[in-house]
Image (cartoon, coloured by chain):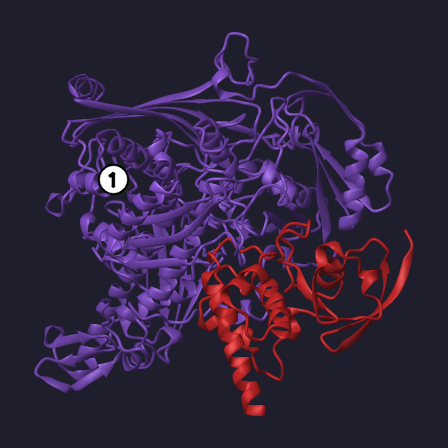
Amino acid sequence: MIMCKTSKEIGGMGHSLKRKEDARFIRGLGKYTDDVQLPGMLYMDIARSPFAYAKIKSIDKSAAMEIPGVLAVITGEDLKQYNLHWMPTLMSDTQMVLPTDTVMYQAQEVAAVIATDRYIAADAVQALENSIEYEQMKPLIDPHKALDADAPLLRPDKEGRTDNHIWHWQTGDQEATEQAFDEADVVVKEQVYIPRIHVASIETCGCVASYEKAEGKLTVWMTTQAPHAIRTVIALVAGHVGLSEERIRVISPDIGGGFGGKVPVYPGYVIAIAASFLIGKPVKWIEDRSENLQADSFARDYHMTVELASTKEGKMTGLRIKTLADHGYTDAAANPSKFPSGLFSIVTGSYDIPTAFTEMDAVYTNKPPGGVAYRCSFRVTEAVHAIERITDVLAQKLGRDPADLRFQNFIQKDQFPYRSALGWEYDSGDYAPALRKAMDMVGYEELRKEQAEKRARGELMGIGISSFTEIVGAGPSKDFDILGIKMFDSAEVRIHPTGKAIARFGTKSQGQGHETTYAQILAEELGIPAMHIQIEEGDTDTAPYGLGTYASRSTPTAGAAAAKAAHKIRDKARKIAAYLLEVSEEDLEWEPGKFFVKGAPERSKTIQDIAFAAYTNHPQGMEAGLEATHYYDPPNLTFPFGSYICVMDIDPKTAEMKIRRFVAIDDCGNIINPMIVTGQIHGGLAMGIAPAMYEELIYDDDGNILNGTFMDYLLPTSVETPNWETGHTITPSPHHPLGAKGVAESPTVGAPPAVANAVVDALSHLGVTHVDIPVTPFKVWKILKEKGVIS
Amino acid sequence: MSKHSITIEINGESFTQEVDSRKLLIHFLRDDLALTGTHIGCDTSSCGACTILLNGKSIKACTFFAVQANNQKIETIEGVEQGGQLHPLQEGFHQEHGLQCGFCTPGMIMRGKELLEKNPNPTEEEIRWGISGNLCRCTGYSNIIKSIQYAANKLNEKQEEAA
């Protein structure tokens, strides 16, 4: 039951306020990057490599330049004159903006064309692509072969590097873990691959860069989740050509979905900015879907060996994981933590496992760079899949019910704050009620009976459980930064004389509904109706500095900053109220919307009275106005959790799979807007079943991508997506000012193992212990064939 | 490149313009007429972000030439609100939280419009199949289905009132 402290009219936390931002979107009046049109605007298009690994022998610009309307062809050599042909990645690696000699993956940017019209630009790209000579080389595609003696050295540009190894990272107590395994009654082990996938937001990436020579000012409208960080990066990378930070304005307008894919800096942005700077006219670059899928940052691609040790009674005693990470040709992971594999060390999950050890090695291959999160905190989905899958494998080995085994091993409520074997301090949790609730909702016992009956008849159905713990809200500055800039976030709140307000934030919504939820937080804390509070984000000329929106960090950081800024405003408001009521500050009490005199509630001043007085009648010696800014550095991350149950029916003849039911119980602490939280869960669940059943970027041995369009890369449609059944428990975060936790990524993290566990559960009587995602009908059909179910 | 003079009625207004024979309808609408409510998501008719109505039938404007629309009637998202009154579908998407980033929403609404005109009482299954050519990455579809059901109910109520 969600309790509201404010009336519906005020619309603070807990109210399912309809979204303020809808007004423009339902009318087609959203303003996305591609909607920006400027006088004299030019169009950029990009010639790309047909090969995964090749030397560039020559680029002949003439055929492209001869096409009327073509203004420029830009190559790596051109950028090299300004030292802009390489750029740094967030992981201290380097990435080509445009190559000068070698292409490293299929669809890599090779040269750009600037023209007066998008069709002419496309013509010129075609002419240009026919005028580039390559010398093909045998690419390195399989990461398992990256360290072989005969593997090509992909990055000879990196001083002192003699192989394709990028980094090794390990955490946990290796010795104690080995001992736990030596002493274990039972050990289970599986090879688990989390495939390379793509966020595929429906809006692709792009920008409009406009450099005004007279003022020396650059404005860039850009599909970015982190506009301030981008501004600083531009200033750091292009400062030497005169672009200093006060003359750079990055505007992140409406964004058509982000999911982590709009965190990185892509070469196209840099080339468009350089082109506008050199030509002095606005340049628009919008990638098409194939470019988006084939060249923009991938997610996942972890090859894991997962081992779990336990007593014969089922008490987990140790976890050991070894991972090979395929990073493509550069480590361009969008990972703002100090840990090379992000937050993978949440891998002990919801269980009280005394010791754990994980190690991983990252390698280069001839594939696109990246490593974005795909709607999760970095590498959390991989971690959750590992622990939730191996927990089921253990249950199967012990002949135990997977729910029962989870109850036995859950971290108990009284153990919080809980220090995990890999060093995280979980802020709060109460796992058993969430699983129990999910089981009650789905009718677990009846389903198990049904399954037994169906098995006897040769029918296949599975019940898959996932009881995940997420780790979101980057982040505490000791562990999280982008190029040294700490991962705080900010709110700036101004109350107008008539008691209305505007608030600006360093984050940027991509559909999460910040214009509504931030207004609700301020309504909760100030008593000003949410409908009277204007929220703005995404313009670096006006918004306070912040690190943007990803990793479910907006509520944990900027949401907290809003509450803190509101408290500062309330402190000043109290002084003004005391002055107006001629009492001392201590005699006043606050309730949402007003201060009143203790014991004499009829003597009061509303926040609107106080706002007016702040500009017209404030105490002598006090500054006029009523506003505050707060930069919030969270003391810890937040640890939302949940339990999901997937019921899967499988046709024993065709292996066609259908999710019959999907129940999701989430706990994200205190809830700001239940309607929006449920909407976020729905969306995340769809993005959870997507990699579990449909999505994978597939490459052949020559590095050709085999499914680089929406014709072949399968996003779930309304037909594949089941009706979501949701619910929640509420365990507030003890350190967040509102008791809230991030939520939008929990379902993406929690859903894939529920699906995979359901499929394996359906096949477990055949001796199947693991199926890699995506669990496609073909994979399952092959298993049924192999097991003799299909003759 | 040959040029053609075309006349198209868009949202009740007639437009006559010279276009290249190869210009796609989506670029004509977005770049030439600044009707940017219709979006581009894939260029291959796969995602439905560019869905509009051509003579009342939903089509994907990213794979349709502007010249093919000569002398025909087009309706885009910008024409759905009439006389300051939201269409029940627009209302439905707002009331049922049927949108998040808003990028697929115009296409969904246009597709929903044809769907409800042909089938005023669709089942959930019929709605699911009906919008299966329109991808949404944010909502998980459940609330989009509810939004269309909301509009169906509202339109049927209006019909009853009129009768």
Question: What residue is disc 1 on?
Answer: A402
Mark 1, secondary structure of its residue: helix
Name of the residue lying farthest toward the front: A457
Q: For the point 18% across and 16% down, which residue is it?
A: A182
> For the residue marked with disc 1, what is the amino acid?
Pro
Is A731 in front, or is A78?
A: A731
Name the side, left or right, on which A718 lies relative to A725: right
Chain holding disc 1 = A
- Relative vertical location of residue A139 with respect to residue A676 in this rendering, above or below: above
Depicted B163 relative to depicted A123: above or below: below
Q: Which residue does the image show at 62% across and 58% down from the upper left?
A: B49
Q: Colour of chain A?
A: purple
- In the rendered image of this protein, does residue A609 appear above or below residue A343? below
Residue A625 image position (x, y, % from top left):
33, 72
> Residue drawn at (57%, 59%), measured in percent from left and top?
B129
Q: Specify the farthest residue to the left.
A: A599
Q: Tell me the quadrant of the picture where the N terminus of chain A can be found.
A: bottom left
Q: Quadrant of residue A757?
A: top left
Crowd tier of the residue under label 1, counting other residues whose Cα lies within 10 Å: few below 14, some 14–19, many 20 or above: many
**Residue A45: quarter of image:** top right
Residue shown at 86%/55% (left/top)?
Answer: B21
What is the x, y in percent for residue B161?
Answer: 54, 91
Residue A434 in the image: x percent, y percent? 23, 52
* Residue nearest the observer in this picture, A313 or A194: A313
Is residue B80 in view from this perspective?
A: yes
Asked where in the image residue A469 lies, by quadrant, the reply is top left
Q: Nearer the viewer, residue A396 or A20?
A: A396
Taking the image as shown, residue A593 lies to the left or right of residue A710, namely left
Query: Horizontal and vertical percent for residue B31?
Result: 73, 60
Q: Is residue B103 above or below residue A132?
A: below
Count of numbered marks: 1
Q: What colour has chain B? A: red
